[in-house]
Amino acid sequence: CFGIWEAQAAASAADLRRASTKKPRAAYRGSDQIQLSNVLNRHLLRTERRARPCHDWSPRELQDFMATVLDQRSDEFQEIYFDRKDRRKLLAKTTHEHRKHWDSLNKAVENHPHLLEPQRESHCRQAVMWWTHHLAEEKRTVLRARNVTVPMLPEGPKRRCGRGEGEEEARVCVGINEANSCDWCHSTQADHDAGKPGTSPPNALDPKFNGPDDGNPKGWDRKRRCDQDQHPRCGLCEGIGGKAWSDLNEDIDMTP
């Protein structure tokens, strides 16, 4: 543990402008998960003397790092994120609540060791986001002076989480995937802009469209997925979705 400082440093005008900006600049985006991670790691290495690759961290070390960030977070940023329904907002209010969640997560991963790598990589992405978007620059400067080491993003594609081992595994994967969301903002959505099939919703009233528009590469049945332009048209109990933890057709708790 790195310790807790009581004094709250006020966020600067530049900090607040940054927190109020949802869409990153082009220099901070990439065409896919791998490229955006490489781009963001290069930026991280330019500002952080002490940065360590994700694979060199244990989940508990990452949790300790995130707890340090939480203890120094800017309350002003939280207000901005909550007011704007920004995905950067924290889902728990206190460090204690996060610690409780992590303890539960660690116990579940002990029961399902194949989840260790997805947990580690999800923690790395969350830790980098918190370091970047939940600390005022003055706080980062203080932590750097104390030789705090910062994790880097994993540079591969997102790992699949889960293999259908039951409710506990499914619950863990929901939490892991929720934190794996850098690409929501930092992806350029290049496939969408290039008009690649399956990346934009079609006009369901145009008869030339007959979904699934991407060919349904995961082989999901019509209960899990039924596109708006699919023929025959979707019935009341088709395309209802639910809480999924992998791309396997059966790895989903369907909406009742």
Image (tube, grey):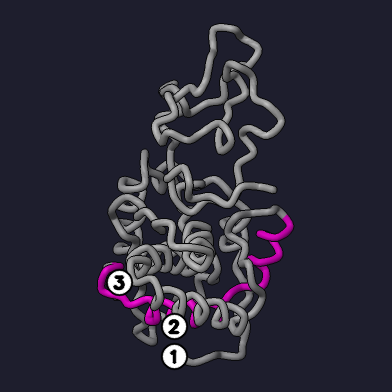
Tag 1 or tag 3, which sits nearer the N-term? 1
Q: Residue furthest right?
A: 83
Instruction: Give the secondary structure at mark 3.
Output: strand
Depicted 154 relative to depicted 197: above or below: below
Q: Which residue is mark 3?
A: 51
Q: Which of the 4 image quarters holds residue 238?
A: top right
What residue is rendered at 34% in x and 84% in y?
147
Location of mark 2 (residue)? 64
Q: What amino acid is at disc 1?
A: Cys
Q: Reply yes or no: does residue 67 show up in magenta.
A: yes
Tell me what residue is drawn at x 59 percent, y 7 percent: 207
Q: Main secondary structure of the magenta part?
A: helix
Q: Are marks 2 and 1 in contact (CB under 8 Å)?
A: yes
Q: Quadrant of the N terminus?
A: bottom left
Which residues, given as a range, are shown in magenta?
Answer: 54-83
Residue type, label 3: Ala
Magenta span has 249? no
177 and 187: which is toward the camera = 177
Q: Is residue 89 left or right of residue 185?
A: right
Amino acid type of the residue tagged 2 in the rendering: Asp
Question: Where residue 103 sits in the image (x, y, percent)?
Answer: 50, 82
Crowd rating for badge 1 (residues with CA inside 10 Å; few <14, some 14–19, many 20+): few
- Residue that label 1 marks: 1
Residue at x 44% of width, y 29% of height: 216
Q: Position of residue 76 (x, y in %)?
A: 67, 69
Q: Position of residue 29 (x, y in %)?
A: 41, 45
Q: Is residue 132 at least partly visible in the picture?
A: no
Label 2's element? helix
Q: Earlier in the sequence, mark 2 or mark 1?
A: 1
Give the x, y percent position of residue 63: 45, 78
In the picture provided, is 205 more to the left or to the right than 159?
Answer: right
**Disc 2 residue crowd, few under 14, some 14–19, many 20+, Cα 10 Å:** some
